[in-house]
Image: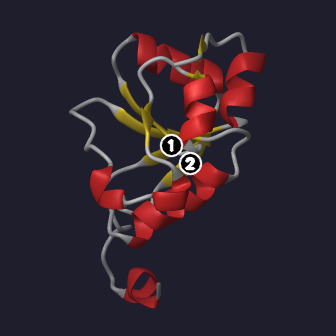
Amino acid sequence: MFSRLFSGSSASKSDTVRIEDPVTIRGWLEAGQAVLIDVRERDEHAAERIEGALNLPLSCFDPAQVPKPGAGQHLVVHCRSGVRCGTASGQLVAAGWEGEIVRMQGGILGWKAAGGPTRQGT
């Protein structure tokens, strides 16, 4: 942390984590501008999910398994309510993730409250 603060260089590529609203993220997904990672557990994901989300449960989360977004794409991490995605984002940063990480505000609950569609069942 101190090296980031006092290294004299610009901000690290791996230290940008921000929260974005589900409506904006839905627009990104519809435009093919997002890679969506669901860090809820497998049973939660199987019961209900956002179409196209890659399930990487927090209980066995490995930052090396997170695919790098293409040019012009955002890496978006979500969970049920927006808490676990913060933990996963922290693990990505600690592992040296290069690039911005976007946490979905309110998780899948926020997504549904904003009218986002989900897929039920397996």
Contact (Cβ within 8 Å) of mark 1 with mark 2: yes
Query: Where is 58 relative to 106, above or below?
Result: below
Query: Where is 59 relative to 122, above or below?
Result: below
Residue under the image location 67 percent in, 35 percent down:
107
Kindly identify which numbered label has been placed on residue 117.
none
**Residue 11 falls left or right of residue 72:** right
Residue under the image location 44 percent in, 20 percent down:
28
In this view of the protein, which residue sits in the foreground, 91 or 55? 55
- Element carrying mark 2: strand
Q: Position of residue 43 (x, y in %)?
A: 60, 37
Residue under the image location 28 percent in, 29 percent down:
72
Residue under the image location 21 percent in, 33 percent down:
71
Instruction: Give the residue furthest to the right.
Output: 113
Task: Please identify the quarter of the rendering in which residue 3 is found.
Answer: bottom left
Circle 1 Cα neighbour tier, 10 Å, few/some/many (<14 / 14–19 / ≥20): many
Q: Amino acid at mark 2?
A: Arg
In this view of the protein, which residue sits in the foreground, 8 or 12? 12
Q: Position of residue 95 (x, y in %)?
A: 35, 70
Instruction: Give the residue furthest to the left.
Output: 71
Q: Amino acid at mark 1?
A: Val
Query: Where is 86 relative to 53, above or below?
Result: below
**Residue 3 falls left or right of residue 91:** left
- Element carrying mark 1: strand
N-terminal of the pair, mark 1 or mark 2, is: 2
Circle 2 Cα neighbour tier, 10 Å, few/some/many (<14 / 14–19 / ≥20): some
Tell me how far mark 1 sits from mark 2, CA to CA: 5 Å
Kindly identify which numbered label has been placed on residue 18.
2
Query: Where is 80 relative to 52, above or below?
Result: below
Q: Position of residue 94 (x, y in %)?
A: 42, 72
Kindly identify which numbered label has been placed on residue 102.
1
